[in-house]
Image (spheres, rainbow, N blue to C red):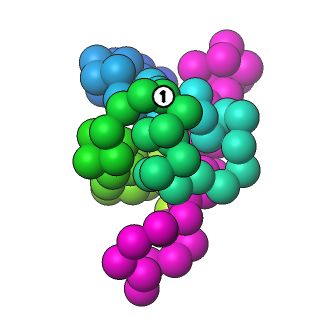
Amino acid sequence: MTENAMDELLRWIISVDRRLILLEYMRKHTIANASEIAHESNRSTQNISHALKELEDMGLIECLTPTKTTWKKYILTDKGKIVMDKMEGKYI
């Protein structure tokens, strides 16, 4: 990923607070689901589910239980980990 593409992705993430909330949660937890994040962040499950879908579409997270319709579990992808490191100032 080019530096310019990374910067655009970071701008996309920080432009909507639900995305930041999701990544903050993922930094503290290995596995996430919408209900747990919504409860911890005082957001609606629908709001967090939307963020999960957005980050999944961008390749930052991956669903571990894609055949389930509820209580899906997500983890960061390698790309998501790189983005997280960049956001924390660790990206080289």
Q: Can residue 77 be seen here?
A: no
For the C terminus, the image quarter is top right
| Near-viewer residue (7 or 34) | 34
Where residue 54 appears, x then y in whole percent?
30, 47
From the viewer's perspective, is 53 left or right of 88? left
Above or below 1: residue 90: above
In the displayed image of the protein, which residue is found farthest to the top?
A: 89
Residue at 44 percent across and 40 percent down: it is 38
What's the residue at 48%, 28% (across, down)?
Answer: 41
Q: Judge by depth and name the residue closer to the eye, 65 or 87.
A: 65
Q: Give the range drawn in magenta.
A: 63-92
**SS of the residue under disc 1:** helix
Does 1 appear in magenta? no
Q: Give me the residue at 66% from left, 17% from top.
A: 88
Location of residue 35 in the rendering, given as x and y in whole percent from the top left corner: 46, 51
Q: Which residue is drawn at 61% across and 23% down?
A: 86
Using the image, determine if residue 74 lies above or below residue 17: below
Question: Of all residues shown, which one is farthest toward the bottom?
Answer: 67
Q: Is residue 90 above or below residue 54?
A: above
User: Residue 10: horizontal and vertical position, in percent?
Assistant: 41, 23
| Above or below for 45 versus 25 | below
Q: Mark 1 points at which residue?
A: 41
Q: Residue 75 colored magenta? A: yes
